[in-house]
């Protein structure tokens, strides 16, 4: 399945809810995001994590291979009154100097990388003792809920998707960071309920890998129309209350 999130940039910026504030609070207990620190956010997309750290007084570089997403990130930064430096590049080969960051973060993107190369590159650009953070903010499918129904619809329209049924927990990332010789590995997770109006949920799903990032426009329109009918028929409450799980791995460079 070919995925290009650049095709979803507008929906991505408008409808994909950013990480909750609680994540930044928890990361601060690890010394991540202190005022004046240097943070590199790889796979930054529309800058959700990057903007959060910039608002906390960090010097932030956001990196992504999709230029349309970075344009959307700049627009959102301007609205928020912050400045982030953006670089069009991949996490596996950033082109940035050795030992130049206090933290490297990867939000909702580690699974898209060549993970071994991305971990090695993160170690290269981190200062000794700097932190690597791999974070996720996933919807949670439960029997009969809106997420399960939506995932089933995505699978019918795009059988190549194959990313449904997740728990929001990623134990394989622990092996990735250990092989890259990171230490002091810790994890945490917590659940939150995110309100989505019907229009917002449709936009959020259009901006997902299995829909507008991989399907042609006419198939996206058919999917969206069917999702609208599904919401009216089975989930009429508006806004919806959508269960999500935050999961993070935090570790230290040698």
Image (cartoon, rainbow, N blue to C red):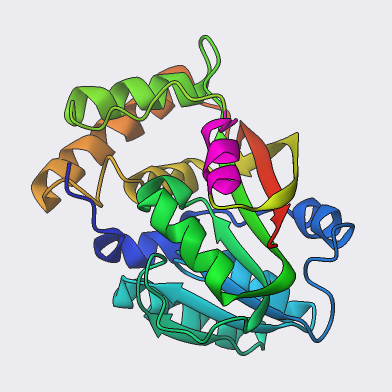
Magenta residues, start to end: 168-179
Q: Is residue 97 left or right of residue 207?
A: right
> x and y percent of residue 177 in the render?
58, 47
Query: Is residue 186 visible to us here?
Result: yes
Above or below 78: residue 53: above
Q: Which residue is at the front of the view, 150 or 125?
A: 125
Q: Which residue is at the front of the view, 153 or 174?
A: 174
Residue depicted at 47% across the width and 50% down the height: 110
Above or below 121: residue 191: above
Residue depicted at 67% across the width and 45% down the height: 249
Residue depicted at 51% across the width and 77% down the height: 62
Quarter of the image for residue 5 reads bottom left
Residue depicted at 54% across the width and 66% down the height: 122
Q: Is residue 148 left or right of residue 35?
A: left
The quarter of the rendered structure image containing the N terminus is top left
Q: Is residue 9 left or right of residue 30?
A: left
> x and y percent of residue 40 in the render?
58, 75
| Identity of the residue furthest to the top in this view | 143
Q: Is residue 59 left or right of residue 164?
A: right
Query: Is residue 14 visible to us here?
Result: no
> x and y percent of residue 44 in the render?
49, 67
Q: Does the magenta-highlighted stretch encompass residue 203?
A: no
Q: Which residue is at the front of the view, 37 or 211?
A: 37
Count of numbered badges drawn on the protein: 0
Q: Which SS does the magenta portion mostly show?
A: helix
> x and y percent of residue 202 in the render?
39, 43
């Amino acid at each position: 399945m070919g995925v290009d999130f650049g095709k979803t940039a507008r929906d991505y910026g408008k409808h994909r809810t950013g990480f909750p504030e609680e994540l930044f609070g928890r990361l601060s207990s690890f010394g991540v995001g202190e005022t004046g620190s240097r943070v590199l956010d790889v796979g930054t997309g529309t800058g959700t994590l990057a903007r959060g750290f910039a608002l906390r007084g960090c010097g932030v570089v956001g990196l992504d291979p999709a230029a349309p997403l970075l344009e959307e990130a700049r627009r959102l930064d301007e609205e928020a009154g912050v400045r982030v430096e953006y670089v069009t590049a991949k996490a596996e080969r950033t082109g940035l100097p050795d030992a130049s960051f206090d933290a490297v973060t990867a939000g909702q993107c580690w699974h898209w990388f060549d993970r071994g190369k991305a971990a090695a590159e993160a170690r290269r650009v981190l200062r000794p003792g700097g932190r690597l953070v791999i974070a996720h903010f996933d919807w949670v499918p439960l029997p009969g809920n809106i997420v399960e129904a939506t995932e089933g619809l995505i699978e019918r329209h795009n059988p190549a998707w194959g990313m449904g049924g997740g728990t929001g927990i990623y134990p394989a990332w622990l092996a990735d960071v250990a092989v890259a010789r990171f230490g002091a590995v810790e994890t945490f997770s917590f659940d939150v309920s995110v309100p989505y109006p019907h229009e917002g949920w449709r936009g959020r799903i259009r901006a997902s890998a299995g829909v507008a990032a991989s399907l042609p426009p006419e198939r996206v329109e058919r999917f969206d129309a069917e999702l609208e009918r599904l919401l009216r028929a089975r989930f009429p409450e508006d806004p919806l209350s959508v269960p999500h799980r935050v999961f993070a791995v935090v570790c230290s460079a040698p």
